Amino acid sequence: MGGSFEVIRSRTNAVLKRARNVGRGKEAGFVLIEGERLIRDAVSAGHVPEVLIAAEGQLEAYRDLATNGDLATRTEFRVCADTLLEGLGSLKTAPGLAGIFREPATTAIDGLPGLVGDGPALILGVAGIQDPGNLGALVRVAEAAGAAAVVVAPGGARPFGSKALRGSMGSLFRVPIVLPESLGSAVERLASLGFEQCVGATRGGQSLRSHPFSERTVVWMTSETGEMPAELEGCTGITIPMRGRVESLNVTVAGALLLYAAASGATGRRELPAILN
Amino acid sequence: MGGSFEVIRSRTNAVLKRARNVGRGKEAGFVLIEGERLIRDAVSAGHVPEVLIAAEGQLEAYRDLATNGDLATRTEFRVCADTLLEGLGSLKTAPGLAGIFREPATTAIDGLPGLVGDGPALILGVAGIQDPGNLGALVRVAEAAGAAAVVVAPGGARPFGSKALRGSMGSLFRVPIVLPESLGSAVERLASLGFEQCVGATRGGQSLRSHPFSERTVVWMTSETGEMPAELEGCTGITIPMRGRVESLNVTVAGALLLYAAASGATGRRELPAILN
């Protein structure tokens, strides 16, 4: 697509205006990604920006992106005065690079069977997580634990806002995201696919230490306040044993402990002399 | 100690000035604690504030504190215009309650044997964590996993700053904090007490899934950037298996997985049919 040699020097420039709009979630279907690391993660995962805006003073570091095959033909490259990259999105300090990307493609619930196959599989289900940073962090740990997909029920943080993308450290570009029409329909479909459905429960559930996870497991994580949606009442509550006078764990920490415990079951590696087995 | 009936209506009031100073870490030996929940946690753990400042509009919710035995005799109670509680410490919105507390007592390295006894014991060691929120969150998960103490080596975030206290959700008031003179002296002393010393290693260590943790284990967590201090080179590196293209996990998440895995060993519960055993 090329671009322009003209350096943007005005905050009211149309490209910057659009970037700010996208950063505020006001242009459906697009996301603003800030910072070299996250943009390179997106590009490595096959995502091609519509627009890349580089700070004049840091241009050298990004020159290779302009010769990347897909980007060279499909991306509009712009250069702008360094400080004008401030305040585009959620970063407090100006990043050297910002990009407007199409939102990663998501999968409808009907596409789930194609993602999880017939054998052992682990899925993270998210129902009502409000903080986009927590949502992103959960997707990061789900990828690390080997989840085949993340199901995000309606009614919580958007998976592709800037904060969620940043919290995921790029995992949201790589893990398939399934968006069901409702939590109930997701639960029903997962049951029909033979998944054991577990849900993190602050208290009263089966102990994480003794629950024998199935080879096909969904770990549902619910809102930070601990409210349990009615649709998940039939799930197996799993409680992380806590000593001292700790009342709860951070939702990402809890999710990590559950996903790693379930992963040992879900990958069928019971024969290992394993701590997490 | 009583207090004053006079409602503080000026930002330059001496009590507020002191609270701001303490909030900025400028009065050695004292900490500012903001918010009802954290203050009640501190009080429940036996800490008595020197001063409690309540917002006029929310006074009713805190009246019981004024009749608490120790506080009634030792705390100066003040009431202030609601908005004046803004900007005392690290909170973005004004808390309804703020308190000036003495820093919780810490233990020198010589006090460690008294904290850990001779049997199974788990310790969290912190060496170079820079973000106070991460430090607090690690102490929270250490308490939950049953750690007998947290050793904080010099050179990282202060354990009793406002952000660390908040991140710990009160755990910093309850878990004994050991402050050695140096990382090297802590390592030496722990070895002499028969502890296996493990350290989270992003790559190249023994797998968390297969390492047989000892009944007396220290889990060292190092700086967020992954730098390994020379003093910890003799420790057993433990690596959390990661799939996908995740390069690392958040330090709190990694700490949680290590502490919970080590806890199963450290409590000698190998006979359980356990996920984390």
Image (cartoon, coloured by chain):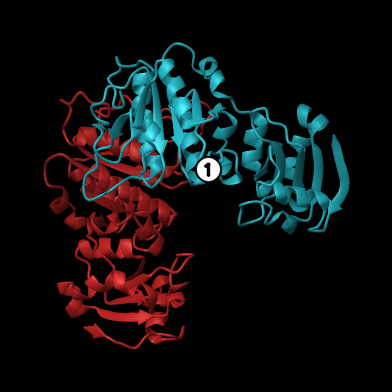
Chain colours: A red, B cyan
Element type at mark 1: loop
Label tally = 1
Q: Residue at x 28, y 52 (%)?
A: A151
Above or below, A7 relative to B42: below
Above or below, B110 relative to B127: above
Above or below, B19 relative to B105: below
Please report, as a chain letter, where disc 1 is located.
B
Name the foreground residue: B55 vs B191.
B191
Q: Is residue A32 visible?
A: yes
Q: Quadrant of residue A274?
A: top left
Q: Position of residue B168 (x, y in %)?
A: 53, 38
List the single residue furthest toward the top: B118
Q: Residue at x 34, y 80 (%)?
A: A79
Dot 1: within a 10 Å radius of its alpha carbon, few (fewer than 14), some, or many (20 or more) residues?
many
| A259 relative position to B191: left or right | left
Name the foreground residue: A35 vs A209.
A35
Which residue, given by chain and number where applicable, does mark 1 sit on?
A: B157
Q: Position of residue B136 (x, y in %)?
A: 51, 40
> In the rendered view of the protein, which quadrant contains the C terminus of chain B?
top left
Q: Position of residue A40 (x, y in %)?
A: 27, 63
Name the foreground residue: A163 vs A79.
A79
> In the rendered view of the protein, which quadrant contains the N terminus of chain B?
top right
Q: Position of residue A175 (x, y in %)?
A: 24, 54
Q: Quadrant of residue A209?
A: top left
| B174 relative position to B1: left or right | left
Q: Residue at x 51, y 16 (%)?
A: B113
Name the foreground residue: A52 vs A128.
A52
Which amino acid type corresponds to the residue marked 1 in the rendered image? Ala
Above or below, B247 relative to A25: above
| B266 relative position to B54: left or right | left
